[in-house]
Image (cartoon, rainbow, N blue to C red):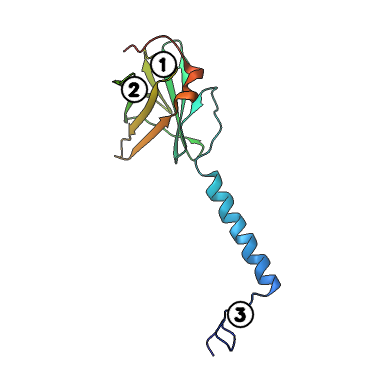
Amino acid sequence: MRAGLTPRGKPAALRPAARRVLAAALALVSVGVCAHGDWPPRFGGVMNDGGETSFELVRAASGIVAHVSDHGEPLDVTGSAPELQIRRGGRKVVVDGRPRGTAIVFPGVRLMVGDEVALKLVTAGGSIAFGRFTPPAVTTLASRSIRK
């Protein structure tokens, strides 16, 4: 008879203590999976739709500022190449950003309700991260026009 099988070839039942240990291990793993990439906004802006690298878009007097974090911790973006892609009514505008520590500044950018927004970040090390923002979420950043 092979280990783990009953004489009839069916899997052996787990003992109650082993079941509890297995259930606890599965619960810990599932909590980590659910929490992956879901971070609350820290600056009153709009968060992207999940992912390891998180972006928070915040309206500023000078345009849009994107705060960047990795697993909830601020990420230094010095030396990176960021761009904001905005789709509005079949038209696509790409705006280059200016890295400033853990934030990216997109000067002169104004978003409107219904804009589809994506942020692309190529880090100094060559890694690429994307942040997509759903049109309903962008309404808190609404303004009149896109400017460079």
Quadrant showing the C terminus: top left
Residue at the spot x=38%, y=31% of the render?
Answer: 77
User: Considering the numbered disc 3 on the image, is that residue within a helix, a strand or a loop?
Assistant: loop
Where 145 sits versus 139, above or below?
above
Q: Which mark, residue 111?
A: 1
User: How far apart, in angstroms, are the residues tagged by discs 2 and 3?
Assistant: 58 Å
Q: Position of residue 90 (x, y in %)?
A: 30, 21
Q: Residues within 10 Å of mark 3 (few under 14, many from 20)?
A: few
* Residue corresponding to mark 2: 87
Q: Amino acid at mark 2?
A: Arg
- Amino acid type assigned to the residue bearing label 3 in the image: Ala
Compared with 6, 97 (above or below) is: above
Task: Name the residue at 37% across, 28% down.
Answer: 118
Identify the residue shown where x is 57% and y is 53%: 30
At which x and y percent is residue 44? 55, 22
Q: State which tag comes first along the sequence, 1 or 2.
A: 2
Indicate which disc, 3 or 1, sits on the residue closer to the N terminus.
3
The residue type indicated by label 1 comes to: Leu
The span from disc 1 to disc 2 (Cα, nearest Å) is 10 Å
Q: Are marks 3 and 1 in contact (CB under 8 Å)?
A: no
Q: Position of residue 136 (x, y in %)?
A: 49, 24
- The x and y percentages for residue 70 are 46, 38
Disc number placed over residue 38 in the picture, else none: none
Q: Which residue is rendered at x = 32% and y = 40% of the image?
A: 127
Label 3, on which residue? 12
